[in-house]
Amino acid sequence: MDVTVESMMAEPEHAASPPAPADAARVADTAGRISASIGAVLAGRERAIDTAVACLLSGGHLLIEDIPGVGKTLLAQALASSVGGSFHRIQGTPDLLPGDVTGTMVPHGDTFDLRFRAGPIFSNIVVFDELNRANPRTQSALLEATEESAVTIDGVTRELPLPFLLIATQNPLEMTGTYPLGEGALDRFAAVVTPGRASPDDEVEVLTGRRGRTLLRSVMPVVDIRDVVEARTVVTNVFVADAIARYVVGLLDATRRHQRVRLGASTRGGVALIGLAKARAAMAGRHYVVPDDVTSLAESALAHRVIVSDASGSVRAGREVVLECLDLVPAPTA
């Protein structure tokens, strides 16, 4: 299923030059250090870790969904601790207000002039724990931040620090006291991962203290925030052949035509999938995308954007549809 190097590099004249192999190698080194740092705390979960790092390097945002106690927050915190830069954690609760996240205008001085006080969203990495316990109004406050890396308060648009990454966690929608994320909010996340329960051997690692939350305090930044900025620049310039782009379009179209689907994957979903595929290519030391980069990430990038008629809001049902579409749409071979 691999594409030849010659076909990958047959780029049109107007395309940006792909990064040099040495640049991709530096991205691979950056990604490897971050993944190793997370893996030293989180037992197993290699696929979830790789997807999380791909989100960081592609400029996308990550949603981690699973039942309580399987390491959702630990994965998010370990990633944040492994990267230098500013970091804040937000705990989702029903009474959390939009201003508690984005910031608000507060009186200042004897004249009580209103001045802006930045909220925790003004950080390089923000971990929003149990996002679906926050009410819909507060969830909506994240739309502009995740789409434009900015927030508008009192008529003034303020840029967020760059790079900016939101890592949110949520329990399944059927859990008590949760608010379903709207389609627009879900569409802002480049990928959704479900870590799942640890294997018996991995649980032994946690129970004996060789992995798990007790080691989180020992995690130190292994890359500087400037390394992330440089890596994102390289990832942006990773080459995508027309055949790869048409393959992604075919997958999007297949989700829209699927007989079980009420709402198929959006164009934003295709953009996210290409971005993640570029990151995966650079993480492997390549300066071009191959079909396997797409197929390995399609489930994480598209499933949450697919609304199934008989299972609205179920990421699991969306995954089933995406896997069927991967079987139906042939990957380019040359």
Image: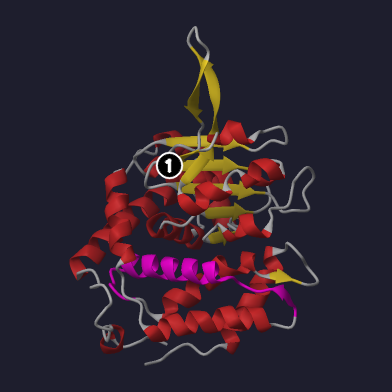
Quadrant showing the N terminus: bottom left
Residue at 60% from the left image edge and 48% from the top image edge: 169
Percent position of residue 13, x then y: 24, 82
Residue 49 visible in the snapshot: yes
- Give the residues drawn in magenta, as a range: 260-288
For the residue pair 242 and 300, the one nearer the viewer reads as 242
Residue at 80% from the left image edge and 45% from the top image edge: 176
Q: Give the labeled residue for mark 1.
A: 160
Left/right placement of residue 62 relative to residue 27 reads right
Percent position of residue 86, x then y: 39, 36
Q: Residues within 10 Å of mark 1 (few under 14, many from 20)?
A: some
What is the tally of numbered marks visible in this picture?
A: 1
Q: Quadrant of residue 18?
A: bottom left
Left/right placement of residue 165 relative to residue 21 reads right
Residue at 54% from the left image edge and 25% from the top image edge: 105
Residue 287 highlighted magenta (yes or no): yes
